[in-house]
Every structure is written in C-alpha cells, then in structure tokens.
Image (cartoon, grey):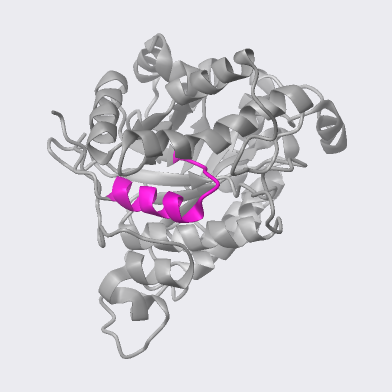
Amino acid sequence: MTMLAVRNDAGVGVTAGTRGERAAYGDRYEVCRGDPTVPRAVAAPGDHLGTVTHPFPPATDGASLPVSLIDRSRTRDGEPVGAALHATIERARRAEALGFHRFWVAEHHAVPGIASGSPPVLMAAIAARTARIRVGSGGVMLPNHRPLVVAEQARMLTALHPGRVDLGLGRSLGFTAPVREALGVASYGPDDFARDLADLEAFLDDAGPVTAMPTGVPPPPLFVLATGSGLTTAAERGLPVVVGGPLLQGDLAPLDDYRERFRPSRGCPEPYVIVSVDVMIADTAGRARELMLPEAWAMVESRSTGAFPPLRAQPVSRLTERQQSMVQRHLDQAVHGTAAQVADQLAGLVRRTGAAELLAFASTYDRMALAESDAALASLPLTG
C-alpha cells in the first residue's frame, strides 16, 4: 500500500467547542489560550509570532505530502446562520494544531446553506485567531470584484499577517439568475478572467495605472481554481492550480497540458497542482458514508428547489429513485471510509494526478464527527 504522510503536530482526536480545542491542541492547549507562562517555542493563535510555512513546499522523494482544508461555512438546520462562521474559525484553530498546511474559505452569495460571502473578512478573523497556518480564499470570484479592490484587500491582509496569506481566484458566477443580477454580472468568460487576472497581478506588482495600498507589501501567492480554460490561463501566467470535481474522474490530459505549457514565474518556478477532494473518515466505512449524506441530500434538494439549503440530520422528504441515484453519484465522487481505506484512495489519487498537495473539503451535520474526521486525516501517513 502506498502511504500518504501529513505533517502533524498533535495527531489526536478532537471534538467540538472548548473540549475539542483541548483535545486538538493536547499539551499545548494553554498556549493556544494565550498563557504567557508557556515557552514561546509554539506561538499562541493571534500573536503573529509563529513560524510560517512556505507556500509551495519543495517536492522530495519520501517527503510528507502537504494537506490543507477548505471550509465553506455550511449552515445547519436549527442553528443561527452566524454560528457557521464561528465554527469555521474554530475549525481553523484545530487545523493549525493538527499541522494542516493551509486553511481556505469560500465565496458564495445569497446561498441559504453557506454563510461565507466575503473571504477577506473571514480570512482576517481566522488569521487573527491563529499564528502559523496559511490562510486563504478558495476562492475570490473575480467576476464580482474589481481587480484594484481585490489587490488592496490582499495587501491589507498580507501587511497584517506577513507570509501567511494565499489568494485563490475563480470565475464562477452567482448560483441563480437573481443573484447574478444583484451582483451585476450576467456573463463572464475565459478572456474576461484572463484580463482581470492580469490586471490584479499588475496592481500587486505596483505596475497598475494607480497604486494599490498599502505599499511595501510583497504580493501573496495567487492560485487559479481551474477547469479547462483556467488551466491554460494559469500555465501561461506561471500560476499554481487547484483542480477537483469531474476532472479528477475522467481524462487527465488537461493536467498534462498545464504542465507542458507552464511558463515559470517569479512566484512559482514550476507547475504546482493542488487536488481538491471531498474527504470523510470514520471508524467504519458505513459510518463515513452516513456522514457524507447530509451534503448529498442538500445537493439533491438544490436541484429541485433552486436553493442550496442548510445541512440537515435527515432529508427533507422521502427520496425518489432518481434522487437516490444522484446521492450515489455524489458519494462516488468523494473519498470516504476508514482511515486505512481513505489512505489507499488518496494515494491512488496522488499517483494518478501527480498532485503536489491535497485540499480536503467536507461537510456534515455532526460537527463533532467532522472534527474527528479532520484529526484522522491529519494523522494519515501519506507521502507524495
């Protein structure tokens, strides 16, 4: 069996809330609460004195594979919507203690099931409550923002949290026609994205028509959330890519083309592929499958209602045969099972894609189970 290795400082099971923080941080719990009597070898979240990590860890034979998390601030039936944002921040704190490389957040507008509509705001809150983990967007959607605004937000974050900010960029439009109308963008193609990306880089490099503030701040690393055209744009501009979804299930020729066309840049001298995958780990394969179901039910419900709903402990209604098939397709695209089963599946995925890093996303109604899954993922012994 090919093994996957993740940098892990704690490697223990975690639960939600204060008890979860103590479990995740282990003997360093009081450090993370800001106890000044603890040696400064490990910084407390929020003091900005921790050792930051390189955005692109060098690939060497036998080295541990960087593994990161992305959290969409999923809302839950019966909870205040704002609770999802607080839960995202606490998950980021646990992720740092567990040794994950990055923690990213998403941008979705007017979606009942997702509380995060402003990645920079949530990134600022997370970075202020952590000390070392890289914090980023997965991603900022360029159709919704002017490049100058994105550049200045990124510079502010980088000035406040040097060496820790990532800027993932995408071109997805709003979920529904009314949302797209409210955002003022009805169409946005590959050429539009390439233009705005070039303008953003110019502002970050002090080469734009006006000066993005604050000055004197090195540009954060940029990442392209890529499909076919996005891969081409990233290769031409020498940028790393994040890929996932159907691309991973089919022909991987687009990844080969990205690597062949890649033009080295100052920030990224060689191709860098992050594979984004839905991961859930539990004590049994059956339990892991159960934990995947709330997200699958939400996907099915959105196809019927046009609105992506909060996570629920049970489906809102009895599923039809067609809906059951849709749930199964969702599960088939995810990686779930026991720790050993997930390690095997991820190892195969890394071999197939040549991934330099894994970006895991998962949602389930049970927050405690999600925290335990994160801890199990951080403990997997995986190499690239």
Determine which quarter of the picture holds residue 263.
Answer: top left
Query: In the rendered structure, which segment of residues is drawn in magenta?
Result: 361-378
- Where 51 sits versus 184, above or below? below
Residue at x 64%, y 60% (from the top left corner): 83
Q: Where's residue 231, x and y in %?
A: 48, 21
Q: Work out whether residue 295 or residue 268 is closer to the camera in this orientation and state it.
A: 295
Residue at x 43%, y 46% (from the top left corner): 69
Q: Does the segment drawn in magenta span residue 277?
A: no
Determine which quarter of the picture holds residue 382.
Answer: top left
Q: Where's residue 359, x and y in %?
A: 41, 39
- Where 208 sits versus 26, above or below? above
- Where 323 sits versus 54, above or below? above
Q: Does the segment drawn in magenta span residue 374?
A: yes
Residue farthest along the bottom direction in this orientation? 37
219 vs 311, left or right, is: left
Q: Tell me which secondary structure the magenta stretch mostly adopts.
A: helix
Q: Where's residue 31, x and y in %?
A: 35, 79
Residue at x 26%, y 84% (from the top left corner): 39
347 vs 110, left or right, is: left
145 vs 26, left or right, is: right
Q: Work out whether residue 49 or residue 181 is closer to the camera in this orientation and state it.
A: 181
